[in-house]
Amino acid sequence: MPDIDFMQLALAQARHAWTLGEVPVGAVVVKDGEVVAVGCNQPIGRHDPTAHAEIVALRAAAEKLGNYRLPGCELFVTLEPCAMCSGAMLHARLARVVYGAADPKTGACGSVLNLFAQEQLNHHTELVGGVLADEASAMLRGFFAERRARARSLVPLGTPE
């Protein structure tokens, strides 16, 4: 299955996160061309600041494969991972990470910093960005536009915005 197909599955997870009221980010872990685990953002619902889509998917994959290390696995995620998620991916020994939209505020794959480029680290993971970036970005923009519109509709009349 090509990268685009796996990213489509990650986008489906992102849509699911949106239905849960979470920021729409989805992730899929793949090994040998087969989906091992999926995850979507759930920090609000789980009351867990670490419940990013990538962490949810990594935990599920590790449980399924019976190993905290995930050699030979690839992770597809709709948004450039943050430092926390990037660190977890490096510790999991993923072979490859593929992301969609860049994150200019917290991206740790090149937008703000690039943890994957640190030569001092003992494991190096291949990094590919920009796969279905327009679709992922559009979903995030739509989510935040909807959230802002909902917040404005809750502002009482006569209240300055």
Image (cartoon, rainbow, N blue to C red):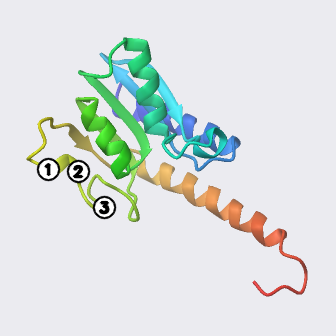
- Label 2: how many residues lie within 10 Å, few (<14), some (14-19) or many (20+)? some
The residue at the point 83 percent across, 69 percent down is 153
Residue 36: x percent and y percent?
A: 42, 18
Asked if the residue at tag 2 contacts the one at tag 3, i.e. Cβ–Cβ closer than 8 Å, the answer is: no
Tell me the element at label 2.
helix
Q: Which residue type carries mark 2?
A: Leu
Q: Quadrant of residue 62?
A: top left
Q: Are marks 2 and 1 in contact (CB under 8 Å)?
A: yes
Q: Residues within 10 Å of mark 1 (few under 14, many from 20)?
A: few
- The residue drawn where x is 33% and y is 51% is 83
Q: Quadrant of residue 143?
A: bottom right
Few, some or many residues within 10 Å of mark 3 (<14, 14–19, 20+): some
Q: List the residue tagged with mark 3.
A: 111
Mark before the other along the chain sequence, 3 or 1: 3
To which residue does mark 2 refer?
115
Task: Look at mark 1 in the image and give the residue it sits on.
Answer: 118
Q: Position of residue 24 (x, y in %)?
A: 57, 47
**Residue 130 position in % (x across, y down):** 34, 50
Please tell me whether mark 3 or mark 2 is closer to you in this view: 2
In the rendered structure, which amino acid carries the disc numbered 3?
Ser
In terms of depth relative to the viewer, which is nearer, 53 or 120?
120
For numbered disc 1, what is the local secondary structure? loop
Residue at the right extreme, as displayed:
157
Q: Residue 2: x and y, percent? A: 34, 28
User: 80 left or right of 137?
Assistant: left
Q: CA distance from mark 2 to mark 1?
A: 6 Å
Examine the rendering and report whether any part of residue 23 can be seen.
yes
From the viewer's perspective, is the residue at label 3 or at label 1 nearer?
A: 1
Question: Residue flagged by tag 1: what amino acid is it?
Answer: Gln
Above or below residue 24? Residue 69 is above
Residue drawn at x 41%, y 29% is 58
